[in-house]
Image (spheres, rainbow, N blue to C red):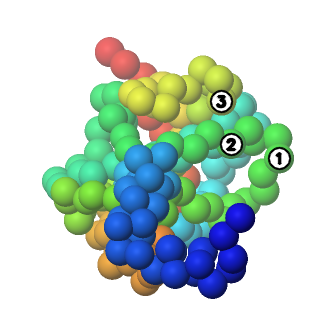
Amino acid sequence: MPSPPAIATAIRSPLLAILLVTAGAAAGCEPAAPGASGVISLAPGAQPIAFKTLALRAFARPSGAFDPSRPISHNLSKNEPLTALSFPHPYRIGGGIGKVDFTDWLFVAWFSQRGSDDLHDDVDGLDPGDVFCAVPFRVARARSSSDAVTYNVDCTLAEVVPARR
C-alpha cells in the first residue's frame, strides 16, 4: 500500500486532477441550472384547503411572459404536499451552476388540485381553478463554485387560472 506522502504526491498530479474533475462531472455532480430562493405568501382570500400540492417551477424565459393556460416546460421542479406546509413558506429550488444560456428566468408556484405523483417533472401545466404566482428573475452570478441561487424571488399566490373555453 502506498504511503500517505506518496498518495498526496499522486493527488497533486495534473492528470489525476483532470480525471477526478471529469469523473465528477460525468457522474452528474454539476447540476444543469441555477436556482431561486424566497418566500411564497398567500393573498387575502387564497386558501390551500381545496388543493393537494404546492408546485414550484423555474425555467429560462427571455420574454418574462407567462400564460397559465399553456404547458410549462421547465428546468427545475419541486412538488410539496400541502399537508405539511404553512404560509408564508420559504423555498429553494435548484442552485447548481451548469451551463446557462439565458439570464432571464421565470419562477412559477401554484396550488394544484393534483397530487405530487400526478404532476410531471418534464412538462405539465396548471388546471382551471389553480391559484398561482409568476415572478421573473435574473440569474445571479455564482457566489461560489457550487451556488448560483438568486435570492429574494418572492411571490404571492393570488391569481386564479380561468376556466378553459
What secondary structure is found at the residue carrying circle 2? strand
**Mark with earlier residue (3, 1):** 1
**Residue 157 image offset from top left, x and y in percent:** 55, 53
- Which residue is rendered at x = 73% and y = 38% of the image? 81
Placement of 28 over or under 92, stated as above or below: above
- Which residue is rendered at x = 66% and y = 70% of the image? 2
Label 2 is placed on what type of residue? Glu
Label 1 is placed on what type of residue? Ala
**What residue would you read off at disc 2?**
80
**What residue would you read off at disc 1?**
84
Tell me, yes or no, whether the two marked residues, 3 and 2, touch with CB atoms within 8 Å. Answer: yes
Placement of 76 over or under 62, stated as above or below: above
Marks 1/2: CA–CA distance: 8 Å
Placement of 117 over or under 146, stated as above or below: above
**What residue would you read off at disc 3?**
116
How many C-alpha atoms fall within 10 Å of the one at disc 1: few (<14), some, or many (≥20)?
few
Q: Quadrant of residue 97?
A: bottom left
What secondary structure is found at the residue carrying circle 1? helix
Marks 3/1: CA–CA distance: 13 Å
Q: Nearer the viewer, residue 150 or 11?
A: 11
Tell me, yes or no, whether the two marked residues, 1 and 2, touch with CB atoms within 8 Å. Answer: yes
- Can residue 112 be seen at all in this image of the molecule? yes
